Image (cartoon, rainbow, N blue to C red):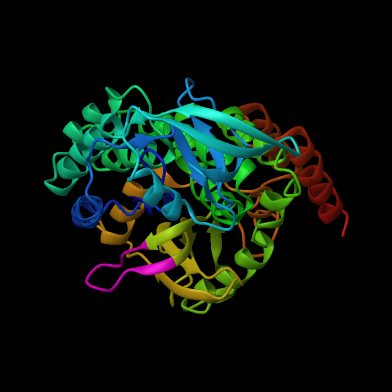
Amino acid sequence: MVRIVVLLLAGTFIAAPTFSMAQDKDQIRNQGKEYGAKLRALGEPRDRCSLGGTLGAGPVVMRTNGTSTLKPGDKLISLNSTSTVGKSPDDVVAILRQIPPTALVPITVERDGRSMDLSVACSNARQTMEPTLTALDFAARGKFDDCISTISQMTYIDTGVATLRAQCASVSRNVAKNNLSALAAQVMDMAIEDARYDPSLRPNVAKELRNAEGIITQGEGAARFRALVEATKRWPGGETLYKSSTPDWTLFRRNAESTLSNRLIDPDSARIQWPHGFLMGTWKPFLSKAIQGYWTCGLINARNRMGGYTGTTAFVVVLDASGYVKYSEIGESSDYDLLTASCNKSAKLLPPPPAELTIVASTSKNSSSGSLADELKKLVDLRNSGALTEAEFQTAKAKLLGGSAN
């Protein structure tokens, strides 16, 4: 599911989105109730000053509503003659709560390395906070489509409100109609831009972008996801952060295949297929507690005691970031198998498989690999579909050709 972590800011709130899509309506309801109660405990909605934007750590302006005198990247030095150096966004909001919504507020900012004195006309925070609270209330009551509709009518939303809308869309009556993949892409666009100005957000945003790969790629296309990845390369000083967060998929495959094979009567006969990549999230086994980690579903076939293959069935594996297998399960070769049904339902959330799964696994001794020409054709198809970039295609092709020569 999509979760939101609320930080009270100048006009509304910002979220740290997560896209581990284990669609739990009760959790979304509880979060809507919790966050709505927190805002009301602070006296929201009320007629008070808003700076017309969203702040991050610093405090630094991360985005504005387009009419504010402030600009993204402005670092607040003082507000209404009160120093804001070293203060949190919550501290800034506490100052704003004492200022009427019609005031002209003196502000000193650092912009492009220079100190600037500005006069900022307040807007009324109620205009944003009131519909935000209404949307949270709808989420708390399970009226997820009303939550989406309320936010869609707002003239200005920040990353937090955009995430709330995606959260409600993920459990709405008609996910396809509400275009969850487009909403997820919008949230990541906004979160990446926020992280440009607030470096403390970058590790989480990089992780959540990886989590959102499946839903964005399947709905918006591989090119749209790659554009988001490229945007992270424009983070000053964090240009390689997303790439460095990539798990070792070869290790994941090796450990997962070893664990799965050890559950079989004839481990050496295992034919394992990886149609999907891994997603960081929650897998909920039947009648057991949910397991957090990198999970995926695949297909497996092996010989029984009589020497015959039992038939292809589904498997699921969950690993931690280091590649340790936390959970594995193999389905039953029967007309109706709960694990196969769960995997079929969840497959739409999973990203495409990385080359380390599609190529290395297919050329291993335990796989049902075809000819070299067949494997090359698979690579070409992946490149043509957008699942592989040209650079990834060339790397995978080199691995395949190198492996075939041994």
Identify the residue at image location x=59%, y=33%: 72
> In the displayed structure, would residue 373 be above or below residue 271?
above
Q: Which residues are magenta?
A: 283-292
Would you identify the image quadrant in which residue 330 lies? bottom left
> In the displayed structure, would residue 129 be above or below residue 400?
above
Identify the residue at image location x=20%, y=57%: 30
Residue 210 shown left or right of residue 334 in the figure: right
- Residue 258 % position (x, y): 58, 74
Would you identify the image quadrant in which residue 282 lies? bottom left
Asked whether residue 277 appears in the rendered view, the answer is: no
Say whether residue 271 is magenta.
no
Nearest to the observer: residue 94 or residue 104? 104
Name the magenta segment's main secondary structure: loop
| Total labels drawn | 0
Nearest to the observer: residue 17 or residue 52? 52
Residue 103 shown left or right of residue 46 in the figure: right
- Residue 106 % position (x, y): 51, 34
Say whether residue 287 is magenta.
yes
- Residue 108 % position (x, y): 60, 39
- Residue 60 % position (x, y): 58, 44
> In the displayed structure, would residue 158 be above or below residue 268?
above
